[in-house]
Image (cartoon, rainbow, N blue to C red):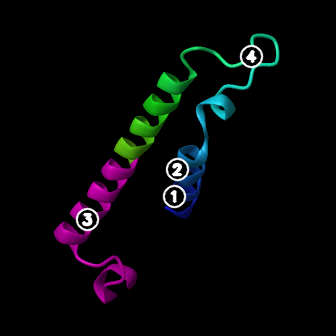
Amino acid sequence: ITTYLYVTIQIFKLSAEEAIDDPVKGAASGSSLQLISVEVIFSALGCLMLGMLLYTILTYGSPFNKEILTP
């Protein structure tokens, strides 16, 4: 979760010029669209990950239950 949050924060800090840095072509015209699509995809993955975590906690209880940790 920590790695995901770090990567997501770094993606949201990027500007359109920094997103696609191609020394041959320069910044592509669709780089801002690509950056927005990456931000949307990472946001959706974050929501999915949070949803799965909440579902697991609500269904099975806390992952630190004594019954789960002891064989």
**Which residue does the image show at 44% across and 29% down from the upper left?**
37
Q: Secondary structure at mark 3?
A: helix
Image location of residue 43, percent across then percent down: 39, 45
User: N-terminal of the two: label 3 or label 1?
Assistant: 1
Tell me: residue 9, above or below residue 62.
above
Q: Which residue is tagged 4?
A: 26
- How far apart marks 3 and 4 lie (CA) works out to 43 Å
Q: Which residue is tagged 1?
A: 5
**Which residue does the image show at 25% across and 70% down from the upper left?**
57
Q: Which residue is tagged 3?
A: 54
Q: Is residue 3 left or right of residue 37?
A: right
Q: Quadrant of residue 20?
A: top right
Tell me: residue 39, above or below residue 52.
above
**In the rendered structure, which amino acid carries the disc numbered 3?**
Leu
Q: Secondary structure at mark 2?
A: helix
The verdict on residue 56 being magenta is: yes
Q: Do the CB atoms of the residues marked 4 and 2 lie less than 8 Å apart?
A: no
Image location of residue 59, percent across then percent down: 17, 67
Q: Nearer the viewer, residue 33 or 67?
A: 33
Stretch of the chain drawn in magenta: 46-71
Q: Which residue is tagged 2?
A: 8
